[in-house]
């Protein structure tokens, strides 16, 4: 599947996100998802982006990578997420870069890095998904 196919999938499964979330690159074991400020919530005072939005972006990117690998018919559920918030992101677009770490019959683990507009990693973590 191409990035255009993945963007169509966002439009079908998450229509409220389609206008603000775009897959910019997809390979067999990695995916890059960019989110603009239209959907991102402001966090604490100072104009930064909230932690839950950073986690939501990483979750969606991991979900899309697994859909790319196993197909649209599969059922995917997030089981465990461990995120480290390294620094406050500057206001603006965020990019999630996910890489496949391990895939077994029922579980898939990905690593997610969330990068802000200055190309600095603001959040990093590991996500474990259940695949049926």
Image (cartoon, helix red, strand yellow):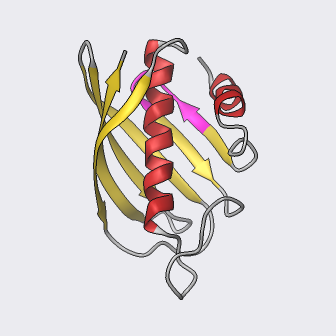
Left or right: residue 18 compared with residue 64: right
Which residue is rendered at x = 44% and y = 14% of the image? 70
- Name the foreground residue: 30 vs 11: 11
Counting from the top left corner in percent of width and height, residue 68 is at 50, 21
Q: Quadrant of the C terminus?
A: top left
Residue displayed at 65% across by 33% down: 10
Say which quadrant the N terminus sits in: top right
Q: Residue furthest bottom?
A: 45
- For image coordinates 68% across by 32% down, the residue present is 7
Position of residue 86 measured from the top left corner of the image (x, y, whole percent): 31, 69
Please indicate, yes or no, whether residue 115 appears anywhere in the rendered image. no
In-front residue for pair 106/7: 106
- The answer to whether residue 77 is left or right of residue 1 is left
Given residues 94 and 131, the one toward you in this image is 131
Magenta highlight range: 24-30
The answer to whether residue 116 of the structure is visible from this angle is: yes
Task: Point out residue 55 in the picture as x, y percentages from the top left corner.
Answer: 43, 54
In the depicted structure, whether residue 75 falls above or below residue 96: above
Q: Is residue 41 left or right of residue 125?
A: right
Q: Quadrant of residue 14?
A: top right
Residue drawn at (36%, 46%), measured in percent from left and top? 112
The number of numbered badges drawn on the structure is 0
- Answer whether residue 29 is magenta in the image: yes
Verify whether residue 115 appears in magenta. Answer: no
Rendering coords of residue 113 (x, y %): 38, 51
Q: Residue furthest right?
A: 19
């Amino acid at each position: 599947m191409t990035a255009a196919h993945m963007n169509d999938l966002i439009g079908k499964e998450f229509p409220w996100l389609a206008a603000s979330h775009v897959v910019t690159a997809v390979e067999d074991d990695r995916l890059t998802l960019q989110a603009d400020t239209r959907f991102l919530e402001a966090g604490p005072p100072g104009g930064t982006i909230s932690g839950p939005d950073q986690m939501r972006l990483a979750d969606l990117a991991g979900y899309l990578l697994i859909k790319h690998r196993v197909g649209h018919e599969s059922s995917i559920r997030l089981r465990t997420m461990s995120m480290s918030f390294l620094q406050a992101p500057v206001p603006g677009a965020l990019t999630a870069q996910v890489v496949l770490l391990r895939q077994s019959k029922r579980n898939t683990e990905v690593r997610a890095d969330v990068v802000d507009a200055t190309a600095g990693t603001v959040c990093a973590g590991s996500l474990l998904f259940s695949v049926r």
